[in-house]
Image (spheres, rainbow, N blue to C red):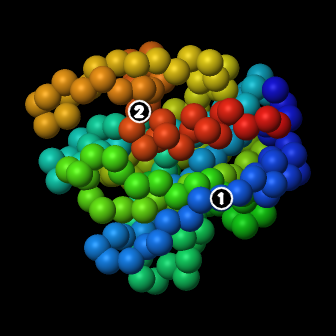
Amino acid sequence: MTHWLDPSALRAVLAARPIERARIEPPLKAAAVALVLAPLADGRPAILFIKRAEHPRDPWSGQIALPGGRHDDRDPDLLATAVRETEEETGLRLSSADLVGELDDLRPVSPHLPPLVVRPFVFSIPAAPPFRLSSEVALHLWVPFEALRGHRTDETVQIRGLPLEVFGYRIGPHFIWGMTERIITPFLSLHI
């Protein structure tokens, strides 16, 4: 599985596939996330996830997510948004040399979530660095590919006090679902 850590192979596969882009106009807001790949100490490829801190005004409070957030007017583009937000949340400074490609734009499915278009950017780094988590992040996780690939399941989550059955990935006490699941599932199905 080390081919997942080969930036050239990833660039070629991601560049060869069509990318779906959404039209981002009011009331939609733009956001970007970073899907960061790195080898674990034993060489296995892994994806970086964060657990969002609990906050009553955050619609994704306490969920497992990819680092990222809303576009700021000072960001020249959505790539800059993904890089800035990742550094703010984790202390990880990504560069354009780490970028291997982009994935399809996504919107939240629930009408209770903000009207966003999220653009995922894929990065590959040579090693997992030390982290400096912001107050927006409760913890970070490096999840190996084998813990995700072929292990998609369904579980019941509580949304606004109501049970909802959703697809996702159970990683110990954590459940990866929602937009994060919708980003990583097609990524993991790529033929690299």
Residue name at image x 19 percent, y 24 percent: 163
* Of the pair 7 and 101, the residue shown nearer to us: 101
Q: Please state the horizontal and vertical placement of residue 153, each as a whole percent of the image.
A: 46, 18
Tell me the kind of residue under disc 2. Answer: Trp
For label 1, the SS is: loop
Q: Which mark is residue 19?
A: 1
Task: Write down the quadrant of residue 24 in the picture.
Answer: bottom left
Residue at the (68%, 33%) spot, across then down: 189
Quadrant in which the C terminus appears: top right
Asked whether, in this view, residue 87 is left or right of residue 47, the answer is left
Residue 178 rendering spot, x and y as whole percentages = 39, 38
The answer to whether residue 102 is visible is yes
Q: Is residue 13 left or right of residue 22?
A: right
Query: Residue 72: x percent and y percent?
Result: 41, 76
Considering only order in the chain, which callout, 2 or 1, is on the residue closer to the N terminus? 1
The residue beneath circle 2 is 177
Q: Given the image, on which type of amino acid does mark 1 rest?
A: Ile
Q: Is residue 70 left or right of residue 87?
A: left
- Which numbered disc covers residue 186? none
Q: Nearer the viewer, residue 141 or 177?
A: 177
Label 2 element class: strand
Q: Position of residue 179 (x, y in %)?
A: 43, 44
User: Residue at 58% of width from left, 28% of height from top?
Assistant: 143
Could you tell me if the residues under marks 1 and 2 are in contact, i.e. CB atoms within 8 Å? Answer: no
In the image, residue 112 above or below residue 54: below
Q: Badge 1, how many Cα within 10 Å: few under 14, some, many 20+?
A: few
